[in-house]
Every structure is written in structure tokens, then in C-alpha cells.
Image (tube, grey):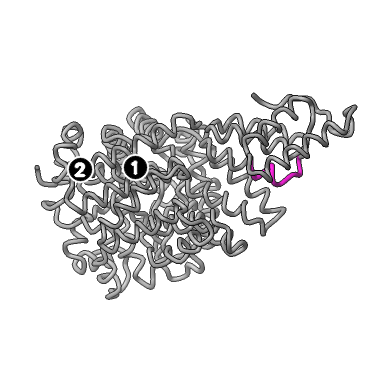
Amino acid sequence: MTAPSDTSNTSQLPDPAEGERYFTDIQAALEAQNLPKAMDLAVRALADGWRAPLFFSLASFRFERDGRFLEAAGVLEQGLEQYPNDLELLTALALCLDKSGQSRRAVAAFDTVLQAMPDYAPAHHGKGAALERLSDVEGAERHYRAAADLSPDFVDALSALAALLARRGRHAEARPFAERALAGDPGRPEAVLALAFADLAAEAPAQAEAALRGVIDDARANAETRASAAAALGDALDAQGRTAEAFAAYQDANDRLAAHRGVQSQADGETYMALAERLTAWFAEARPGEWRPDPGTDEMPAAGHIFIVSASARSGADRLQRTLAAHPGVAILDRSDALESAEREFLMTPSGLGRLAGLSADAGKRHRSAYWQRAAALAGDLSGKVVVDRAPLGAATLCLISALFPKAKIVLALRDPRDVVLNSFRRPFLVNPDLNAYLSLEGAAQIYDASMRLLEASWERLPIEIAEVRLEDIAAEPETEARSLAAFLGVDWDDAMARAAAEAPDASMGRSDDSRWRRYAGELAPVLPALKPWVDRFGYPEA
């Protein structure tokens, strides 16, 4: 049920006492902590023609509580037609948009709120959640911290920040935020989850297992928190050698997300799988000589420019990035939005790649200028630095790099395809519905194959030079590989690179003949034939 479209307001209605009764009864229900009654009264008030921001807010929450986020957003949009300057309604709308999968629209709505109220903690928290869903973890952390600073007892922001830091392996930083959240809300699921991650990192899997089972069973935990706990439970069981139980936990995590996302809209655009297949088809059908962008002159403010490309965000390229970032002459852009304007213009529309193929020098200059301005905003002064950009769209970015930055160097971060697919399945993309394919082994294998086919099609048809780096080699011979990377970057050797290469963000990654996937070979059997061409192509050993 949505609110009527009648534009009347309380001053035009015949019996103001009736409207006052609604307010009085709703306030009494809220004071008695009877939220269902308050929501029902708000729906009745709207149906009777009464209008107030509180009524729209409560009526929308009834739909949101049932996972009907698009209907909730519809109620809030009607409320904003009546009260266009009500920032609480706009914040609530932004939250619904984010939960329905429309995270880019949500970010824009939160920006409108924050322009009017820069110190409004709920909007910072909400924008952080939307950015995290869009895989902008740096931006998410920044806004979660802003919310926690503005409102030190804001449990939602504290627990979200703790969980984000914990998922990134920054357990010492996460712990105080988790403890503050638990002080305000004992047993808060997201905070308990953050501490369980710390237990796993401290090699206390049995202790983590008990806490994680508690989160999964906690009725207060939302679907994504339970899924995250189930995936972490898989790690706790894996660490105890209980492989079959671990795989079942990973499957449970993905099943929970799949069920949750069944009600979500995919309104933010095509999936990465569809994008990769569309770009691959364009290169396959392109006529000889059709790729002819005018490179113009790259007014690069940096000493060098490197792009890291991998087949999956779960490839384990964090080790490579950490190795490069350790050098004082390197500036890292970690899955940044520096290429966003070019991605939006040339990748997100069916005709975009054709226009990129004939890019003019003026258009190229405009996009390069936007890129370097954003890079400087993210990384500071780039003078004398080698800029390393870990492009979030992976192989789909190669055509942009070729057209806009033909002198840039490209590093292809390789890992055994079987480990990449298993790791993608074990580490579901909790906040990015665009990557739902990873919720099954078959889907993870398909998206890996699509990404690698796009990479090969781009490599064959674009004037690009790619250096392959096997992540297992960095793990096995950190100093040797770090020295090779320094030479490739054109920077002097620094011992910090070897130390960073030796610090394993994924302790399972070692020699390719001792990979984690071998312990799950039985579960992986259905997808091994699809991965075999890439296993052979990159020279990884057979089972």
C-alpha cells in the first residue's frame, strides 16, 4: 500500500482535532515502544488524507521492515513532494535506495543532505554504507569515521566502521570501535563480528566459531551481517581442518545473500558479466583499423603511471599492491573512482566503445584532466611519484587505458584460477549486488572466464603491453619479485618493498603446488573443466 497522491495538508482538512489524535496516538505508541502500532496508525493517517513528515517516515518503514524497499522509497518520494526540504525524509529515501540496489542514486541523495547539513551524522553513516556497497571502501571508511566523530555514541556508525576495518584485516584499529559499540548496545551483531574476525587473525578459530554462530542466530542481525558471519565461520572451520563443514558454511553465506538479493533491484546498470561479454563481442566484431583514438599529449603530473589489472577483485592482488605502495616514490589509487567519468561515458552505454575507438584529442585531454585532478585529490602531490592505479573494473578498463594513457604500463596480477574462483566463493561480495554471479561456484567460474576472454580480446587488438606477475611467486620469493617490480616501475630499490611483499594478507597463498583449492578439489570438480584452459594458459600445475 502506498500513500494517496492527494496534495492536501492539515490546514485544509475540516477537523484538525482528528489530525491531532493521530499525532497523539502515534507518539504514545512510540513511547510505549510499540512500533508496529505506530506504523499502522501512520498508514491510516495518510489514507485519511493527513500529511506530516512523521506519517510518511513511519509508513515507509513498515515496507522497509518487510524488505519492500522500492515501495518504501515510493512513500518517501510522495512525502518529499509535500515537504521537499525535509532532510530526514531525504535521508530515509537515500537509505531505501541503497538497500534496493540503487546505491549511486543513494549517494547523490546523501550528498544533497550533507550540502545542507555537513555535520549530520546519519547522512555520513548512510553514505558510508552506500559507498561500501559500491566497493569504495576508502570513501566508506571516511564517512563512517565522520559519523562516529560527530556522534561518539552512534552505535550504527561505530559497528559499521569496526566491521569494515576488520574485513580489511585492520583488527587493532577495529577493536576499540567494536568495544564502544558493544558498550552502547551489548551483543550488537556487527561489533561481535568484528571481534570474531580479530580472533581468527589471532589464530583462535574455536573462540571465533562460538561468536560467529551467535551472530548467525541473532534475530537482530540483518541478512548481510549473517552472511558475513557464515563466511567467517567457514574460515574458522577451515582453520580447524573441518573442510566439509567449512564449505557448507561458505555455501550457507552465499545462499543467504542470494535469498536476500532476490528482492533487490539491479537499477544501477548492467552486471560486470554482461559488461565483459558486451566488450568482448565488440572487439570480436570490430573491423580492422576501427580502433583509432587520437592519443593527444598526456600532461602527466607524475613520473610514471602503472595500472594493476586482475581477473577478480578476489585474486589476492592486495599483496602486489602492498609491495608497490611500500616504496616512498609510489602513490597508490586503490580501486578509486578516478576513471569514473570515462567509464560512465564509454563503457556504460552500448555506443560508448565505438565512440572511444574514434576518440578525439580534445575529448581525450578532457578525460585525462579529470583523471589527474581526481588522482591528486586522492593521493596528494604527484610530482616525482609513480602513480599505481588498481582499476576496479579490471579487464574492462584496458580499452580506456589504451585510448587515454597509451604510455601507461600494465601489470596483470595472476593467481591460480582455481584459487581465484574458490576465494571468490569463500569471500562473497557482501555489499555489491552487481557481483551476484560469485554466489555460486559456477557463477564465479563463468565471471572469471568472461573476464579473461575480455583480457585476451583486448590484448590481441589494442596497442598495449602487459607484464604478467604471478602472486604465488611474490609469496614464495618476496625480495626477488619485489626487485623485479622496482625495475619495472623504474624506481630505485627500497628494502621496504621486500618487507611488504613478505607480509601475507592471505596466509594460504604460497607455492602453487600447496594451494588451498587442492583441499576443496572435490567441491570444485564441477567447474574445473571450465577453468582448465586458463590453468594451462598460465602454466599452473595439474591437480
10 Å crowding of disc 2: few (<14), some (14-19), many (20+): many
Q: Where does label 2 land, which residue?
A: 418
Q: Residue at x 45, y 35 (%)?
A: 353
Q: Residue at x 14, y 45 (%)?
A: 518
Magenta stretch in the rendered image: 84-92
Could you tell me residue 283's position as x and y percent? 35, 33
Q: Which mark is residue 127?
A: none
Report the mark closest to the observer, 2 or 1. Answer: 2
Nearest to the observer: residue 37 or residue 267: 37
Q: Amino acid at mark 1?
A: Leu
In magenta segment, residue 86: yes
Q: Residue at x 50, y 59 (%)?
A: 181
Residue found farthest to the bottom: 495
Could you tell me residue 397's position as x and y percent? 40, 45
**Dot 1: element:** loop
Lateral position of residue 299 relative to residue 34, left or right? left
Name the quarter where the C terminus is drawn. top left
